[in-house]
Image (cartoon, helix red, strand yellow):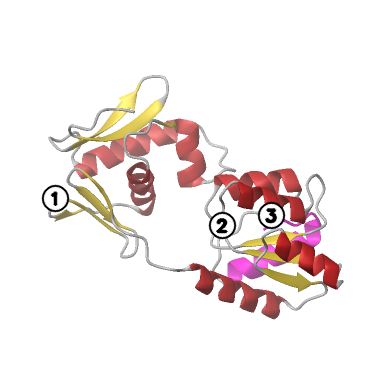
Amino acid sequence: MAEDEVRMAALLRRGLEEEGYAVDCAGDGVEALWCATEQDYAAIVLDVMLPGFDGFEVCRRMRAAGRWAPVLMVTARGQVDDRVQGLDAGADDYLTKPFSFAELAARLRALTRRAVVAPPSALVAGDLRLDPVSHQAWRGQKLLDLSPKEFALLELFLHHPGEVLSRSKILEQTWDFAYRGTSNVVDQYVGYLRRKVGLPSDAVDLETVRGVGYRLRAFGTPPP
């Protein structure tokens, strides 16, 4: 969600969290664009009147970067030309202030339903397999007993097989971009994950790349 009015942002965030959404908030266009291009969102609520880049520019730039999360544009400007400009910039829907929260929530539900084209496929590397839909993972035929954070960490590595992921990248993607802890927590959880999965194995390994981070490699797959 991108909204520069602090009180409005707090109210919307609280309401959306009560609806079951996990919410990131950006207070200006530069931060909003960074979030939209670095994170995967089910939907984005984007205010037009933002400092830095306005909502139209944020939407144009995120579309140009290949980010296709549905966008609900929100503004106090209700003229037809403004609505057309927002839709031409790549927005999926347009809501004029003042609005009821119930209407915003209904429009978000419609956008997120429309965005789900097919369930994500299973992720595989060597004899490791993870199903994002059932939230289960296996090593060979063995079902793995992973904590939510261990599961998220494994899912991240399986999305990037053969790629070296830095500790800061892992923190941003598996915890959240606002995490203020140290990178030691990554090392701890990689250790937990290795023990539970039983790595290294003949089929797959989670390698430490000294001074950089970690890389998941399937046996016989050369590093990039």
> What kind of residue is marked 2?
Trp
Give the Cα separation between the discs numbered 2 and 1. Answer: 35 Å
- Do the residues bearing badges 2 and 1 touch, measured as CB atoms within 8 Å? no
Q: Residues within 10 Å of mark 3 (few under 14, many from 20)?
A: many
Provide residue 212's location: percent of width, then percent of height.
42, 23
Residue bearing the label numbered 3: 59
The quarter of the displayed image where residue 160 is located: top left
114 vs 156, left or right, is right
Q: Does residue 183 appear in the picture of this structure?
A: no
SS of the residue under disc 2 = loop
Q: Nearer the viewer, residue 177 or 52?
A: 52
Give the Cα separation between the discs numbered 1 and 3. Answer: 43 Å
Instruction: Give the magenta part as a residue range.
Output: 1-18
222 vs 103, left or right, is left
Identify the residue at image location x=34%, y=64%. Answer: 133
Residue bearing the label numbered 1: 140
